[in-house]
Image (cartoon, grey):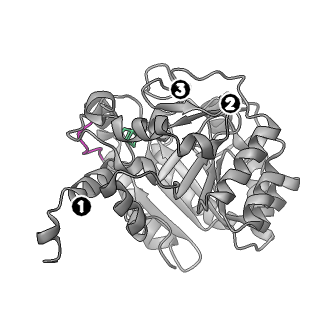
Amino acid sequence: MSTLYSNLKFLRYADHIEALRQGRVVAPVHVRIKPINRCNHACWYCAYRADDLQLGQEMDLGDVIPDDKMFEITEDLIAMRVKAVTFSGGGEPLLYKPLPRVVERLGAAGIRVASLTNGSNLRGDMAEAFARWGTWVRVSLDSWDDASYAKARGIASGQFSRLLDNMRAFVARKSRCVLGVSFIIGRDNCAHVYEICALLKAVGVNHVKLSGAVVANDLHANNLYHREIMPLVGEQIRRAQADLADETFAVLDHYHELDELFAKSYSTCPFLQFLTVIGADCAVYSCQDKAYTADGRLGSIRDRRFRDFWFSEENRARLYGLDPSRVCGHHCVTHGKNLALNEVLALDPDHACFV
Ligand code: SF4
């Protein structure tokens, strides 16, 4: 099985590193779009809805990208030669009705398309569009049966069984679109990790990625929360990898203590030109960790095209002016990549060739 996950993907885009060196703005490699803020589930750990987490401070649950705006954005992404688009929340992206047509337009133009989803609407036209044009779909999960699923998400019983049916039907399409599961581990489900891995293998998904719930903006509070369940979880992950992993199914262990220093030592975020986020409020944000926050807001595209905004002087000033040491004192998925990029950008050119 080739590798799907890596923190080094950005190394394939040397032009972007050169642009950063020269202070230029280039089209992002990857754009995340949050088409709708409404969600039909209420997960207890959702970073957009938990009061004490960083995300979503300025999120309006009623926001949705108007259809015509979405198709305008779609044409801009194609014209800008963006390589990949991921649909994600805010809300549940597969509740956005025009999405099958958007996915088809992007896919037919050669852009790789993916979605994070709760999987409840991965059926009908939506499933057909992703099966035909998608590169991957990743279902978020935290439960092991109908009762635990209903409790974790504040929904009616029976939905877990329906989700498994949706995933089985998607697998049966035998498409090239990789169906994975992101399983979020907390104290309620920590004894069921092996069980869910075995169940997901039987369903036919390609892989399960196991991660810890982020429960606070504070590093030590997160680590303390997970420390007491870590031996139990670790034993099950090792057993699942030994018993279940094969050429059709992978168990990806992303469950570990957070060791990043939340305080940032660097004053620019070079990764902003690799990945950007468009919110359901028609604003562009720096990244998924600062979506719907004032500090992460790059600018609005409500009354102008995305490509006009992206290449504007206003955006250039924001991209090079956002100072993580001042405004990003929280968990950041990009931290390791920023450390690497800042080190590369600081290299003395006379010495950089002594590899
Ligand atoms: S440092 Fe991290 S959290 Fe801050 S803007 Fe960059 S990617 Fe986002």
* Image location (x, y in percent) of residue 12: 42, 70
* Image location (x, y in percent) of residue 222: 33, 34
* Disc 1 versus disc 2: nearer the observer: 2
Dot 2 falls on a residue whose secondary structure is: loop
Ligand 1 located in image quadrant: top left
Q: Is residue 91 above or below residue 201?
A: above
Q: Which amino acid does label 1 sit on?
A: Val
* Image location (x, y in percent) of residue 212: 42, 44
**Which disc is residue 56 wearing?**
3
Left or right, residue 325 beside residue 211: left
Mark 2 or 3 closer to N-term? 3
Q: Is residue 177 above or below residue 150?
A: below
Residue on which the image places disc 2: 302
Mark 1 or 3 closer to N-term? 3
Q: How crowded is mark 3: few (under 14 residues within 10 Å), some or many (20 or more)?
A: many
Magenta-drawn stretch contains 258: yes
Foreground pick, 323 / 292: 323
* Image location (x, y in percent) of residue 276: 51, 46
